[in-house]
Image (spheres, helix red, strand yellow):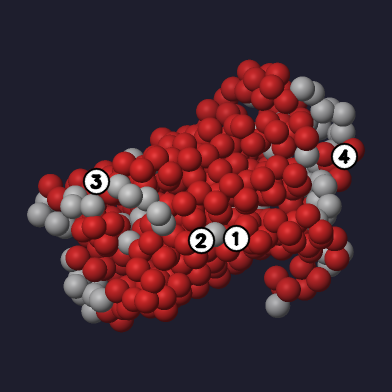
Amino acid sequence: MVIFSELKTLTSSQRKVVTASFLGWMLDAFDFFILVFVLKDIAQEFGTNVEAVTVAILLTLAMRPVGALLFGLAADRFGRRPVLMINVLLYSLLEFASGFAPSLMVLIALRALYGIAMGGEWGVGASLTMETIPEKARGIVSGVLQAGYPAGYLLASIVFFALYPLIGWRGMFMVGAVPALLVLYIRSHVSESPAFLERTHAKADGGIIAAIRGNIRLFIWAVVLMTAFNFFSHGTQDIYPTFLETQRGLSSHAVGAIAVVYNIGAIIGGLTFGSLSQRLGRRRAIVIAALLALPLVPLWAYATSPYLLVAGAFFMQFAVQGAWGVVPVHLNELSPEAVRGTFPGLTYQLGNLLASANATMQAGIAVHYGGDYALALASVVAVVALAVALLAGFGPEAKGIRFGTSPGRDTGTLLRAGLLRGEK
């Protein structure tokens, strides 16, 4: 009820921006996670193994920083709204083309290009949203925005559950072209960021370089934090369906049903901890959610009953995506003012790059230990949950900082003055 009451305080224009950014990230995640459900089928068609196909996931993640930089610079120069439309159109077209790949190499190349388009969407959409809404709504809207990611996974789960037996893995990718229709909504209903229109911003290509030089400690910390965060999410998601199928022997329908349940948990977690961060602070909310994941590892990875697996998966994603629900607002509040379209997305996606080998690494661990995917999942998640808690807990915070022209209140200035350790 608190969540809905906070969202009701937004104006009609602000709600449309939130809706567009949420849908952009949800549909982007939908397109990404389609591949996760069909790894085994692609391997069979192209005469290879699952580990080889996970290279497509690796390259998708590895190319996302390129998109974050290119589209982020464009958003800081030309505005968030037009760049967001280009992002959505590109990732939709590349997703559609993936369904026609004649070989594994072509599919991998298309997924790498898709990674560039995907890499730009989050930072641009998050900055557009956070710069549009009032400060008191940032926490809950951050949770709403980040809930788009598990919502996309949930949508992919439903499509896999309902349509996969009829359309196969190629048809799954073709359905991924539907997000292109979102461009029409953005064009007709979404306004440009008021903060972007308000300020006189530096040249984009020099702006990000100057921002990194002037905030090098912040930049390094943010990249390391987002590396841990990306291991946290991808370490619990990318090969989990494969684990359920190959090690627990569940059918594709059962896997799809479990994925639906744990993504509902993820959405609830993101909304819950995003909202809590407005009261507890960004750091405390992240730490609590990350530490909550640790005692859930045995139930999530080692339960043998399908019902216990459902419970473990639900609560694990509640914790993982609960921590993630704070990320959009946390990174945007810490970002230097002139490069908010670039800085959050670039640090996020560089973290993705450093964590991009996760699926291949976890698959390799499982193969090395005789197909023990449970060991691969548990060992990675236990380490990164603790890393997220420590990095966030001892890092900076800028809760409530004003966006737009604010002389003497830029994040870099406040950091150097030692004012961002605790809450504002």
Quadrant of the image containing the C terminus = top right
Q: Which residue is mark 4?
A: 197
* Callouts 1 and 2 close, C-beta under 8 Å: yes
For mark 1, what is the residue? 179
Q: Amino acid at mark 3?
A: Ala
Q: Amino acid at mark 2?
A: Gly
Q: Is residue 159 left or right of residue 295?
A: right
Q: Earlier in the sequence, mark 3 or mark 4?
A: 3
Residue 52 is tagged as 3
Q: Quadrant of the N terminus?
A: bottom right
Q: Which mark is residue 176?
A: 2
Element type where label 1 sits in the image: helix
Mark 2 burial class by Cα count in 10 Å: few <14, some 14-19, many 20+: many
**Residue 120 pos. (x, y %):** 60, 42
Asked whether the residues under the numbered discs 1 and 4 touch, taking CB atoms below 8 Å apart as contact, a structural biologist would say no
Is 199 situated left or right of 49 in this image?
right
Relative to residue 162, is residue 182 depicted above or below?
above
Question: 282 and 6: which one is in front?
Answer: 6
- Residue 6 x %, y %: 77, 68
